[in-house]
């Protein structure tokens, strides 16, 4: 896991989510599983917990060639569906709820980190549609069955670079 | 008669929902509802008591350190070492928590609250030397206002120059948050979830180099607080001076105190930098008795048996319970709704006559032509955060210099077969308490009472509204389509919003196209 400001880096894999809230924590869980595999030395795994903005800010100041964000994504498909979005190509906007209270969503956090100088050539979001968001530390069977594939997809992103 | 709903999470599940009923332009009814079952205490049962500080940190993305602190204080208590923490351990715990206070207050003002008062559109067309402003101008030109939404059009009162200065500081504040976090990792090891705070003290080894690194970060933060944060809060306060009468609330404040200055002898410490206290409407302070803390569940989706003292109560959900409207319990002190947060600490220190606090509070009040009674307001809460940031940052320099490298940071301890423990401290957002029961060296029961529950909790068994509900009642709403008054009141409590659920929800159709197999 990272301690700030000591490494030179090229590729960052950032898992985001609440590990106490079932499938919400799938991004953090993916990073845990990746850390058990041998990864190239220039790949950094980051367990971002629920602080996406702060983790993104901690990457400011060092050139990142590829940032892979792994998170639970609600895209309207069946639970377990895997999504891949190239955020540097498409951008990603949350739906601005007119009366929302400045909740900081991942897209907002990315914008804010860019304002502060975040410099990534490519940002890719890999996400899985969750089945259960309840206080538990286990993933649902629907998401669990896709975790091997998700880890493989992260490795493909790493190899692409 | 018209109902307005503020539902801050537009994701799959909301976390906090505010419903107000407005009649003739005035709020007649207000209900604040936590909409997510906050019963994760159940997953702590059967675990090693020391795991609690690692796990409870993950509840929240903004105040993980406060949970680590309260949890470890509870375990210290249960393991019988609460009064044996070495000075180095106590000081370093204070520094880690202090770093978290600074980032939390800077986040609240610049990145959560300021967009209610500062018009980011003022950056449109900017082409001057400030790189941050140029980037914001690009975002505005591209219609990418994401982080600044919702914009309360129609009630921006700052001049163009003032808006530009504040937007420039918004960007600098992002850098300051990064510095606060890096400062935290000097002793905390990692962020956002630190690994140093442990039963008996801290596990890190302080050196002169680490102390110097910490002080270098702190120096940058103190300059920012003095030169930007405090002046910007004052600038906003002057332009919105009527907000010193907005969102008054229950005029009853509670702090457990925070930042132990001596080895701790009871649940509320021996001597704390901010001393514990209950503060009344006349700013008179009295002692806190933890036995007066209870939780009501009449209007909460919990079984009626879950009411009472957190030391012995439980967490049995009862979804669909008749008449209930919130997943938050309703904490009460002496049976009364009570507000927690920076205002409680600052008002308490003002009542104590703590010199560095009274000087700043009096200076702010006199700039605004306001009286101490005006502290019970939206502006009072916003100003209390800025004043606290300065006072804590200044004190942190002394704490860092008091560390003695080479001396112990932790005492040994062993798990008791059976014990109870209480950990009470303040988070940036207000009092946080952890109650722990150990049986067979494992967690048998665990209860948390957190700041957002105190402030945003529902009505109690006598149907008396909670603090934020009271702050909303009676508010005049100028424009039902754009109830900026209500947003500003709720946000002044710094409610914990986005911590639990963190799902990315882009437009469904758009993202479905990117599905892979």
Image (tube, rainbow, N blue to C red):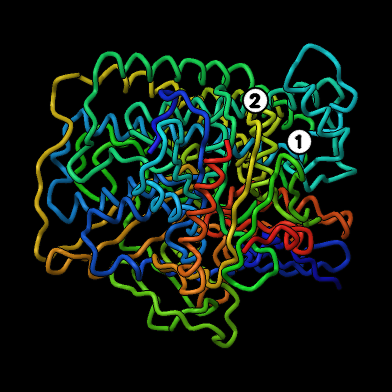
Q: The C terminus of chain B appears in which quarter of the rendering?
A: bottom right
Residue in the image at 63% along x and 44% along y: A124
Is the residue marked by circle 2 packed among few (<14), some (14-19), or many (20+) residues within 10 Å? many
Residue in the image at 24% along x and 18% along y: B207
Does B312 appear above or below B267?
A: below
Where residue A138 sits in the image (x, y, percent)? 40, 67
User: Is residue B418 rendered to the left or right of residue B111?
Assistant: left
Does B366 appear above or below B456?
A: above
Q: In the displayed orientation, state which residue is furthest to the bottom.
A: B322
Q: In the displayed orientation, state which residue is furthest to the top.
A: B129
Query: CA gap, disc 2 to disc 1?
Result: 35 Å
The foreground one among B121 and B270 is B121
Is the residue marked by circle 1 packed among few (<14), some (14-19), or many (20+) residues within 10 Å? some
The residue pinned by badge 2 equals A117
Name the chain letter of the residue that bears numbered label 1.
Answer: B
Where residue B350 sits in the image (x, y, percent)? 48, 34
The residue pinned by badge 1 equals B241
Asked where in the image residue B310 lies, by quadrant, the reply is bottom left
């Amino acid at each position: 896991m990272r301690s700030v400001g000591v490494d030179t880096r090229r590729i960052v894999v950032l898992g985001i989510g609440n590990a106490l809230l079932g499938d919400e924590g799938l991004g953090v869980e993916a990073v845990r599983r990746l850390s058990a595999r041998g990864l190239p030395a220039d790949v950094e795994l980051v367990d971002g917990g629920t602080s996406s903005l702060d983790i993104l800010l901690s990457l400011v100041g060092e050139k990142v060639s590829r940032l892979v964000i792994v998170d639970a994504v609600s895209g309207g498909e069946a639970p377990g569906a895997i999504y891949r979005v190239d955020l540097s190509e498409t951008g990603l906007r949350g739906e601005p709820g007119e009366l929302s209270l400045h909740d900081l969503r991942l897209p907002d956090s990315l914008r804010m980190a860019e304002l502060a100088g975040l410099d990534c050539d490519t940002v890719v979001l890999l996400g899985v549609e969750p089945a259960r968001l309840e206080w538990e530390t286990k993933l649902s069977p629907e998401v669990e069955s896709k975790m091997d594939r998700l880890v493989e997809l992260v490795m493909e992103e790493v190899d692409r670079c | 008669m018209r109902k307005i709903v503020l539902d801050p999470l537009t994701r799959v599940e909301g976390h906090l929902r505010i419903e107000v009923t407005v009649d003739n332009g005035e709020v007649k009814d207000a209900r604040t509802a936590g909409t997510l079952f906050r019963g994760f205490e159940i997953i702590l049962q059967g675990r090693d008591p020391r795991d609690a500080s690692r796990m409870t940190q993950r509840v929240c993305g903004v105040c993980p350190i406060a949970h680590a602190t309260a949890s470890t204080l509870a375990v210290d208590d249960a393991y019988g070492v609460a009064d044996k923490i070495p000075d180095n351990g106590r000081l370093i715990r204070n520094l880690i928590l202090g770093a978290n206070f600074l980032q939390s207050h800077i986040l609240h003002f610049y990145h959560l609250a300021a967009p209610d008062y500062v018009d980011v559109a003022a950056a449109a067309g900017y082409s001057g030397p400030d790189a941050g402003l140029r980037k914001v101008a690009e975002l505005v030109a591209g219609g990418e206002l994401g982080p600044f939404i919702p914009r309360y059009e129609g009630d921006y009162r700052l001049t163009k120059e003032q808006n530009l200065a504040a937007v420039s500081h918004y960007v600098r504040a992002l850098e300051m948050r990064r510095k606060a976090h890096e400062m935290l990792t000097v002793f905390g090891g990692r962020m956002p979830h630190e690994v140093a705070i442990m039963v008996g003290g801290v596990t890190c080894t302080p050196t002169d180099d680490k102390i110097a690194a910490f002080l270098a970060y702190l120096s940058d933060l103190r300059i920012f607080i003095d030169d930007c944060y405090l002046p910007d809060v004052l600038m906003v306060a002057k332009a919105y001076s009527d907000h010193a009468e907005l969102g008054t609330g229950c005029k009853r404040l509670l702090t457990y105190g925070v930042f132990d200055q001596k080895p701790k002898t009871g649940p509320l410490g021996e001597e704390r930098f901010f001393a514990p206290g209950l503060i009344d409407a006349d700013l008179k302070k009295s002692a806190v008795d933890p036995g007066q803390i209870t939780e009501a569940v009449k209007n909460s989706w919990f079984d009626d048996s879950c009411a009472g003292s957190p030391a012995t109560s439980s967490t049995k959900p009862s979804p669909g319970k008749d008449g209930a409207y919130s997943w938050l319990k309703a904490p009460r002190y002496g049976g009364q709704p009570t507000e927690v947060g920076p205002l409680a600490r600052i008002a308490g220190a003002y009542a104590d006559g703590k010199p560095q606090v009274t000087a700043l509070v009096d200076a702010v009040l006199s700039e605004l032509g306001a009286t101490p009674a005006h502290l019970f307001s939206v502006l009072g809460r916003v100003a209390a955060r800025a004043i606290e940031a300065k006072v804590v940052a200044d004190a942190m320099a002394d704490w860092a210099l008091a560390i003695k490298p080479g001396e112990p940071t932790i005492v040994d301890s062993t798990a008791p077969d059976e014990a109870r423990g209480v950990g009470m401290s303040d988070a940036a957002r207000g009092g946080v308490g952890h109650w722990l029961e150990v049986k067979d060296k494992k967690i048998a029961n665990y209860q948390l009472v957190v700041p957002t529950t105190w402030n945003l909790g529902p009505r109690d068994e006598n149907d008396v509204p909670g603090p934020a509900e009271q702050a909303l009642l009676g508010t005049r709403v100028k424009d039902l389509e754009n109830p900026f008054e209500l947003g500003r009141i709720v946000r002044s409590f710094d409610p914990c919003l986005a911590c639990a659920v963190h799902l990315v929800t882009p437009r469904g159709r758009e993202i479905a196209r990117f599905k892979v197999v």
